[in-house]
Image (cartoon, rainbow, N blue to C red):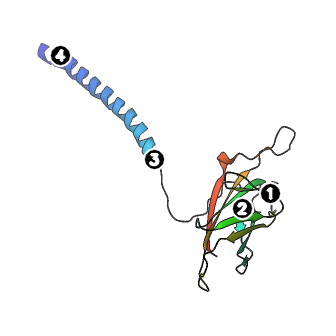
Amino acid sequence: MQRREQKRPGRIRLAGAALAALLVIGLWAGQAFAYFTAFTSASGRVPLHLGVQTEIEEPSVDTENMIKHVVVSNSGPESCWVRVKVFAPSAYQLTYEGTGWKAESDGYVYCTQPLGDSETSPELLVKISGLPEGAAEGETAHVVVVYESTKVQAGPDGTPLPADWSMAAVVTEGGQD
């Protein structure tokens, strides 16, 4: 009988150690599981609405003079700042015209006033020059317009603060113009 009592403390210690090890592994596995579930990746084109809802429009393209007309509209409930960047083959030169827009050294063209709910930006004209001589009739030039929008933050007096582009939503629209 005394033998049985001696085995029990050993079993209890073993069960306690196993329970402690299981608890430690459980806590560690919980962190690892949280890490693996906190990451995701996606591909394709799915609209994502983050409060600011903007849309780019290209009402017309003047193919004779190689001018792309760009307008950005805000359909969301919040005011936003907008900027546009245009990409084209390196042989092409891009120049920008339009009141209410300002080109900066970072390659973006900024709308100088925030867009309120249901407002549309002034028209931005993107002139494309430097097309190769002897280009065939109907040959296309791939020009991609990227725009970003970010929510307007107001100062203590209610006036809009400068744009915080670290919170921008990036949207890419491609075309064959």
* Type of amino acid at the residue the image marks with label 2: Thr
Q: CA distance from mark 4 to mark 1?
A: 81 Å
Q: Pointer 3 and pointer 1: residues touching (CB < 8 Å)?
A: no
Residue indicated by mark 2: 54
Q: Is residue 1 visible?
A: no
Kindly identify which numbered label has been placed on residue 115. Answer: 1
Q: Could you tell me residue 111's position as x and y percent? A: 78, 57
Q: Indicate which disc residue 5 carries.
A: 4
- Which of the two discs, 4 and 1, labels the residue nearer the N terminus? 4
* Secondary structure type for disc 2: strand
Whichever of callouts 4 and 3 sits on the residue coming sooner in the sequence is 4
Q: Position of residue 155 (x, y in %)?
A: 82, 40
Callout in the foreground (3, 1): 1
The residue nearer to you, when weighing 31 against 87, is 87
Direction from residue 71 to residue 32 in the image, left or right: left
Q: Is residue 88 left or right of residue 58?
A: left
Q: Which residue is tagged 3?
A: 37
Q: Residues within 10 Å of mark 3 (few under 14, many from 20)?
A: few
Callout 3 amino acid: Thr
Q: Of the two numbered discs 2 and 4 on the same chain, state the one appearing first in sequence.
A: 4
Q: Give residue 162's mark.
A: none
Report the Cα–Cα distance between label 2 and label 4.
Answer: 76 Å
Residue pictured at 61% horizontal, 78% vertical: 133
